Image: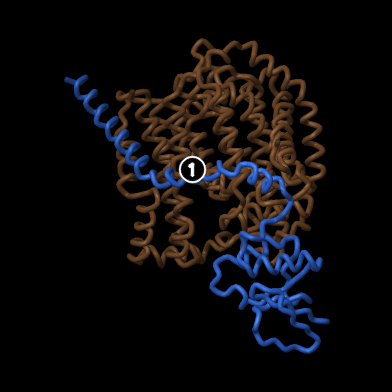
Amino acid sequence: MLPANSDVVALTLVQATLIPWLGGIALLRMFRKNLFYPSFPWTSFAGLPLATGLLLRYAVELLTGNSLYADIMCLATAVAGALPALEMSRSVVASRFVLAWRYIWLFPVFCLMISWLSVVSPILMGDAKVMWFFHGKMIFFAKGINMAAGFDDPSVVFSHPDYPKLVATTGAAIANIATFWNDYLPKFSVALVQLPVFAFFCDLISAGQPLLGLVLLISGTSAAGTLLYNGYMDGLLGLWLTGFLGALFCLVAPTPGKSRPPSERRELPGFFAAMALVMLPLLKYEGLPLALIFAGVSGFLFRGQITARLREKHFFKNHSYACAVAALGVFCFAIWRLNCLRWGLSNDLSGDLPSMLQRLQGRVVDPSAWRLCLDYFSDYFAPPWLLAISVALGLLIRKKGGDQEQEKVVITCFAGGFLYVLFLLFVYLGTHHDLFWHLNFSSLRTLMPAQNALMAGFGLFMLSRR
Amino acid sequence: MKVTRSVYSKRWQLYLAAAAFFFILFERRAAMVVLVQDVISHFNQVSDRIELAGSSIIRLDMLPPEAAAICEFLNDQKVGRYDLDPRLFVDNGNALQRTIDTCWPKRLVKGARHRFIPAGVDFQEPGCRVEEIGRGVAHVACEQ
């Protein structure tokens, strides 16, 4: 006998997964005929189409301000994606790689595990309850991201209503499917958003790069604990950042499927890196500096290669799907920021730069403020010795010691992590909150992505010097 | 000689990176233990959990008692706007935010006709009726 409500749960979760996945396939199919990459089976078959579908729905909802239009459009694209999905399934079977992948079951196991944990644990913890999923609830009851949702209501200022809404909107879409809001089903959106990264890591483990996959998986998840599924965005942010670094490494390191041409082996990691960069600012505002810092550092280090690739004939035409998805992500961010301006939404840290600089000046000369920051940064993921080792290794990496390209990725991890820690230090020293309270309240979570990057850097360094 | 130096430098950098990687992992053991314990705790009473996940009932038992009483009252009486006395949630963490979130789409509006105050507080305003609704909360309805 099945448990009560199991039909509601199962149907909701299946629809919430299938609809954006099929929609993503339909969109990507417009730009590229063959979407399946045998070297990255789960990422190309499941992960990236799903992420694309989620972005597409978010964009339509932002544009129309109406959940119904977004749902109708999603259903239409899902119908359009059904045939290409069947075709893609046939290429999966025809590729004959399936039988050769030893750990092909790994992703479904992760998928079930993270889905189960997201759905059966209630939205209970502080920010998840009164911020991220509160916004989802507002969107659900207003039937869209619009003025009626009440983001400008003076009583909800505490919830930072200007924060990015990708997960909240997806949660509201899941509640639309279920036809009601509760403290469980909408949190499935957290699982949906992180599944593409798990697909990427599992592909690396199962299809030829087990050590790289493990290093990334450990770096991305080991510090997060319950943040992976309790409804906070920090776990997702750390995971997507690690995914970006992994994709960057795959772009320069030999990737699975050595019989295939290098251009094909690099195509999917490139797409994944672009997706990760646009995902970061849509999850949380900290994602914006993270994306800018890591894109800036890697762009600077790989400027030669990037310029050469951009000069290639038909570069944009050949990579139109990745460019389209990246543009979609940037578009979502821009539209949400425009809505914030239109509705007068701002958070406690924005729009007050002069007084922030004044507070910063005051605290920079205050030894107790530095001591407090040092204490918290040391306790929570960014002790000075770790930063020192990463900087030292970054500087000492010799051109003759190993593969230059791979070591540039390692330097990206170290330099990016270090710069992000500096950025956070700047933010904390300039905060208008009580410094002790602010550090105590948030530094454990905000510093985590920086340490993920440093840890991934050490791991990738080991792999590059094997 | 040159080759030997290069290999030597390669090795100590490798060992340093490995030590840093595994030390970070060791430092993260608390988070991993919490994760494992929490994951295990979510695999018991499976059918109850599925039933809850698929139910349209909002969990008021996870709220501070005052907040649960207020949301319950607003739902039962189909009241759309309410006001809260600041004394209700003094020193009570984020109970005020939890009330606003859980009662949503009922909205907190300053000066609304329906107001909630701590039970037992002396409240006298012309045209207002005070009624205790339990769990330390009293409801005030004013005619306006």
Quadrant location of the C terminus of chain A? top left
Place residue A38 in its image quadrant.
top right
Secondary element under disc 1, as helix, strand or loop, is helix
Which residue is at the front of the view, A321 or A19?
A19
| Position above or below: A142 against A52 | below
Place residue A400 in its image quadrant.
top left
| Horizontal and vertical percent position of residue A90 | 69, 14
Q: How many marks?
A: 1
| Position above or below: A193 against B107 | above
Q: Name the residue rendered at 34%, 50% in the picture.
A: A383
Chain A shown in which color?
Answer: brown
| Horizontal and vertical percent position of residue A139 | 73, 52
| Position above or below: B21 against A90 | below
**A244 to the left or right of B123:** left
Which residue is at the front of the view, A178 or A303?
A178
| Horizontal and vertical percent position of residue A122 | 61, 50
| Horizontal and vertical percent position of residue A436 | 42, 64
Residue A303 seen anywhere in this rendered image of the structure = no
Q: Name the residue rendered at 35%, 37% in the picture.
A: B21
Q: How is the image coloured?
A: by chain
| Chain of the residue that carries numbered disc 1 in the rendered image | A
Residue A46 seen anywhere in this rendered image of the structure = yes
Furthest residue toward left:
B1
| Position above or below: A248 against A179 | above
Q: Name the residue rendered at 82%, 44% in the picture.
A: A68
